[in-house]
Amino acid sequence: MQFGKPLTALALVFALGLGAPVMAQDAHDHGAHDAAVADLVLNEGAKWEGDQNMITGMEAIRATMAANLDAIHANTLAADAAQDVSTEVMTQVEFMIENCELEPAADEQFHLVLAQVMDGALTLDEGEVEPGGLAIIEALDAYGEHFEHPGWEPLTH
């Protein structure tokens, strides 16, 4: 794993309160990607309110994915570039976790998004470009459907 801090991914999983179930998922079981965001719900029919740290982090992840979108879809992103994308995504996840100011109900829903983003980043780090990238893109699109984020544009695939 290329993440800057040892055990960062494991620590983030536990910080998210997701524990062993996410870590126990087979990294090659990409059908599980949809499970995280499939459980998202709206806030009584409305999008969840976020905080500026969430908006900043998600914008950075979206920009990273948008810059690499064609290579992800063509499955031509080089292994070192995939690891760089993974590292950048995980850096933003870390930032959002460390600076989270969400109310508990919104935080719980956002954890579902972050779980899929982390799963995709770990898959990218393992060199599985298309499934890892698509998992992150799906999480970004679900995020936009469930959270208030001025100017958010989906990265449809």
Image (cartoon, grey):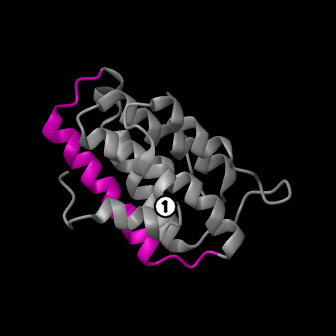
Residue 72 falls in image quadrant: top left
Q: Position of residue 10 (x, y in %)?
A: 35, 61
Q: Residue at x 55, y 52 (%)?
A: 113
Q: Position of residue 38 (x, y in %)?
A: 66, 41
Asked whether 86 falls inside the magenta stretch, the response is yes
Q: Is residue 149 visible?
A: no
For this view, does 89 lie left or right of residue 140?
left
For this view, does 37 lie left or right of residue 137?
right
Element type where label 1 sits in the image: helix
Amino acid carrying label 1: it is Gly
In this orientation, which residue lies closer to the viewer: 63 or 32?
Answer: 32
For this view, does 72 lie left or right of residue 1?
right
Q: Residue at x 58, y 45 (%)?
A: 36
Which residue is under mark 1? 19
Asked whether 35 falls inside the magenta stretch, the response is no
In this orientation, which residue lies closer to the viewer: 108 or 99?
Answer: 108
Residue 78 falls in image quadrant: top left
Q: Residue at x 65, y 59 (%)?
A: 109
Q: Position of residue 4 (x, y in %)?
A: 19, 64
